[in-house]
């Protein structure tokens, strides 16, 4: 079983102490956001084959990665660096500082330990195509030689995303738009050419209708990369998305995060509807608790133990 930590929140940035405590205890509990079922996830070394961290700021967890490796869990990072203006990304580090952290992780844990995400790509009057190209160019130049892959995707306009964009448009006069698919395909092909010139392959996350020659289907949850990190063959989970309803190349994983808990304040975020709610949830979080965020439901379904059932890569 692969653990995803987490596409629902930034565990390295905000909940690292909790995560290490749960690894030491050998389990955690999560609440399914759709049916509210509680699952007890076995985090023991016998059940966990590797961990995929998702983060925009791993600074406070640099020592945590060392602890995770010392405990014997292979891992790699999906590290988002976009360099967007502060109006879009309120509380993320400057991209130059993120590059420094990226290089530190690469130097310490090796060439397969970190993947760059330029994700999601959002078009607006603040960031048109030409500005994105210049932005992608300067970041990719700084990361040359530090990673073999960059993952991109285009913003999905969920209801909560549209509501936040409408508020910013009303307050600041910023215009957001979603180009047609042919424009997106042409644009991502241009990014792919630039990435290749920097020694990176470019893959597209969860949007297979936009794939074209030279643009791979992203495999953000990747047992093959984890096997390279571990320097041994790891079990192969089912080849299906870890995100319900999405169309991508990911293998199955168990995510241990919770929605409405991330504090980065990214305008386009699908995981947080209300920043005040996220802040309140952060303050109610118990680093010593079984749950990252305890359920508020007056009644919840009985716990069930989740363990992986897997084959092998080779």
Image (spheres, helix red, strand yellow):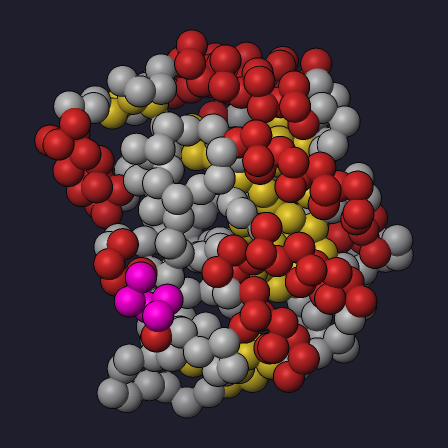
The residue shown at (75%, 60%) is 66
Q: Can residue 309 be seen in this view?
A: no
State the extent of the magenta-drawn residues as a range: 279-283
- The x and y percentages for residue 87 are 30, 33
Image-based side of 1 in relation to 14, left or right: right
Disc count in the image? 0
**Relative to residue 250, is residue 190 depicted above or below?**
above
The residue shown at (36%, 86%) is 301
Quarter of the view holding residue 148: top right
Looking at the picture, tell me which residue is in the foreground, 201 or 276.
276
Looking at the picture, tell me which residue is in the foreground, 61 or 19.
61
Image-based side of 236 in relation to 282, left or right: right
- The x and y percentages for residue 247 are 48, 43
Image-based side of 9 in relation to 125, left or right: right
Q: Is residue 142 visible?
A: yes
Looking at the picture, tell me which residue is in the foreground, 262 or 305.
262
Q: Is the magenta stretch mostly helix, strand or loop?
A: helix
Single out the residue that lies furthest toward the right: 232
**Relative to residue 295, is residue 68 depicted above or below?**
above
For residue 238: magenta?
A: no
Single out the residue that lies furthest toward the top: 130
Quarter of the view holding residue 249: top right
The residue shown at (31%, 20%) is 126
Image-based side of 73 in relation to 120, left or right: right
The residue shown at (67%, 62%) is 64
- The x and y percentages for residue 55 are 54, 49
The N terminus, quarter of image: bottom right
**Relative to residue 256, is residue 44 depicted above or below?**
below
The C terminus, quarter of image: bottom right
- The x and y percentages for residue 206 are 49, 40
């Amino acid at each position: 079983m692969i653990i995803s930590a987490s596409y629902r929140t930034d565990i390295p940035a905000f909940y690292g102490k909790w995560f290490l405590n749960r690894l030491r205890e050998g389990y955690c509990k999560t609440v399914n956001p759709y049916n509210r079922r509680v699952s007890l996830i076995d985090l023991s070394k016998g059940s966990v084959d590797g961990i995929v961290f998702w983060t925009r700021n791993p600074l406070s967890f640099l020592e945590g990665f060392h602890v995770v490796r010392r405990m014997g869990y292979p891992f790699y990072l999906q590290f988002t660096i976009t360099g967007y203006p502060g109006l879009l990304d309120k509380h993320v580090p400057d991209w130059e500082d993120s590059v420094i952290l990226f290089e530190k992780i690469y130097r310490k844990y090796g060439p397969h330990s970190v993947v760059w995400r330029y994700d999601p790509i959002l078009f607006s009057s603040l960031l048109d195509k030409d500005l994105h190209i210049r932005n992608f160019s300067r970041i990719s130049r700084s990361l040359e030689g530090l990673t073999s892959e960059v993952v991109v995707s285009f913003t999905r306009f969920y209801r909560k995303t549209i509501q936040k964009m409408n508020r910013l448009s009303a307050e600041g006069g910023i215009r957001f738009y979603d180009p047609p698919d042919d424009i997106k395909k042409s644009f991502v092909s241009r990014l792919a050419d630039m990435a290749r010139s920097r020694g990176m392959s470019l893959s597209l996350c969860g949007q297979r209708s936009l794939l074209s020659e030279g643009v791979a289907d992203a495999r953000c949850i990747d047992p093959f990369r984890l096997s390279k990190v571990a320097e041994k063959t790891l079990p192969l989970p089912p080849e299906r998305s870890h995100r319900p309803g999405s169309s991508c190349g990911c293998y199955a994983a168990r995510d241990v995060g919770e929605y409405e808990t991330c504090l980065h304040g990214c305008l386009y975020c699908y995981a947080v509807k209300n920043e005040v709610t996220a802040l309140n949830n952060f303050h109610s979080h118990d680093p010593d608790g079984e749950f990252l965020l305890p359920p508020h439901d007056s009644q919840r379904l009985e716990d069930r133990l989740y363990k992986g059932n897997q084959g092998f890569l080779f």
